Image (cartoon, grey):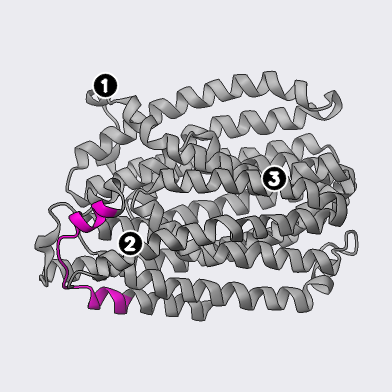
Amino acid sequence: MSHAIIILGASLDGAGRMALSFGNHAQVARTINPQVANHFKGAANNRQTSSGRRMIDQRRRQATRSSLVGLTQRVLQIVGTLITMPLVLHALGQDGFGIWAAAASIAWMSATVDWGIGTALLTAITRSLARGDATEARRQVAAALRLAVLIGLGEAALGLIIIPLVVPPAAALPYQVAVVGMAFNVPASLGGPLWGGLQRMHMVWVWEAAQSVVTLIALFALTRITADPLWYVAVTFGGLLATNLASLLHAFLRHPELRPNSTDRNAPLAGVLRHGIPYFFLGVATTLAVHSDNIIALSLLGPMAAASMAVAQRACMMALNLLWVLTQPLWPAFTDAAARGNPVWIRRNLVGATIVVSACAIGGCAILIAFGQPLLHWWMGGGLDVAPPILWAMAIWIVVPALGRIPDVVLNALGVIWFQVAVALVYSVLAFSLKVTFAKFWGVAGILAATGLSYGLTHLPAYWWWVGKWMRKISAKPF
């Protein structure tokens, strides 16, 4: 993986130095999507200047540094998971472990419960600062915070009402704690988008590393005290909330220019919500297609299958998160490049980063299939085994989405969200249907395989079609 970072950094370096000559592609972008045109307006006067060269070098350094720090954080997170999962399994037993895992999986829905305002804020801050408008960036932050508080309060109240209606009374309390914790996390989690919009993704990873350490220590202590899943859920979300709040406060201390003040009381909420809604629908579709696996396994196959699913999906998420953390810094970098009129930089890094990510995913999954069963058996202390069909399904789950990761980042950076929403809705319906059907025949392996298969039938052809069409258009112009 370290070689992958070096290659990715070299790709950023080489592509950046070769992307010093370009034209105004507003008209080209408009032929694909009107939203993309706005990124290129008035950006053609950056040709072969020393400031343009410095900006490209800075973008490359920021993305590479963020990737390195992010990889370190993910390694720390993996170590924490390797330690806590078997401890929690032995402390709670398979039934309690399944309940904790299903409730804790709600934390993965963070991109959904904030109605997309966090993701929209990241892009808005990057665009505003690229144009030199710090006041507009601050107004966006103020509006996002106010809206996040309102959304969080509403979701907390709604969760307390709905959970008892859909979950058996004996198991309702852990899910209520999870829902309320996730709702309170809505405003707290805006620290991540703040750092990301500033192209300081390494600070996001630093605070996530702190969360991993806090959660690891707390869960380890609980395994020595209690076997009640409720406390494990509370600690999981408590660590998430505490570190996200600390990250938000840190961002405001380091960047007071983004700190809301009394003049921002009239910052428009509607604009933030309007830009966030597409990300919300995208998050809902992703949640239904991916992060509902534990709940589906628990409902259709029982607690023991849910425990197996928790282990398999956690391993998949660890692998995919390693790839995600390498590529996430490209989002603000792509946004910055688009706002400054550097489409060639986007094009070259799209190809290079895709090769790196695909190679990492395929190589990692080859190791998973060859050695996954004894490693997982050792990891869980013999308390839970994963059959070979599940390993092959996990490989599909990891490799297929990895092939579409970089086009996904490009579409996000260019603001092409409604197209992604349409694709994701088709994907979620297909994935959910296949999961329910496959679970009857192949159990946990069927649920996992349905995710990769559905992604390959929807996202991959659609994303590469759109990006390929855009690349052909910009390639028709001289750089």
Rendered location of residue 441, percent (x, y): 87, 54
Circle 3 or circle 1, nearest the eye: 3
Rendered location of residue 182, percent (x, y): 59, 34
**Where does the N terminus fall, quadrant-wise?**
bottom right
- Residue 110 visible somewhere in the drawing: no
Q: CB of mark 3 within 8 Å of CB of mark 1?
A: no
Q: Which residue is pictured at 48% across the width and 76% down the height?
A: 355
**Where does the C terminus fall, quadrant-wise?**
bottom left
What amino acid is found at the position of numbered circle 3 in the picture?
Phe
Tell me the number on the disc at residue 266: 1
- Classify 126 as above or below 23: above
Kindly report the distance in space between the C-alpha atoms of the residues bearing marks 3 and 1. 42 Å
Tell me: 146 left or right of 87: left
Where disc 3 sits, the SS reads helix
Question: Is residue 14 inside the magenta stretch?
Answer: yes
Circle 2 or circle 1, nearest the eye: 2
- Give the mark nearer the N terminus: 2 vs 1: 1
- Classify 316 as above or below 258: below
- Residue 113 visible somewhere in the drawing: yes
The residue singled out by tag 3 in the image is 432
Where disc 2 sits, the SS reads helix
| Viewer-nearest residue: 52 or 359 | 359
- Give the mark nearer the N terminus: 3 vs 1: 1
| Viewer-nearest residue: 53 or 43 | 43
Q: Residues within 10 Å of mark 2 (few under 14, many from 20)?
A: some
The residue singled out by tag 2 in the image is 470
In the image, the segment drawn in magenta is: 13-31
Kindly report the distance in space between the C-alpha atoms of the residues bearing marks 3 and 2. 31 Å
Where disc 1 sits, the SS reads loop
Rendered location of residue 197, percent (x, y): 34, 49
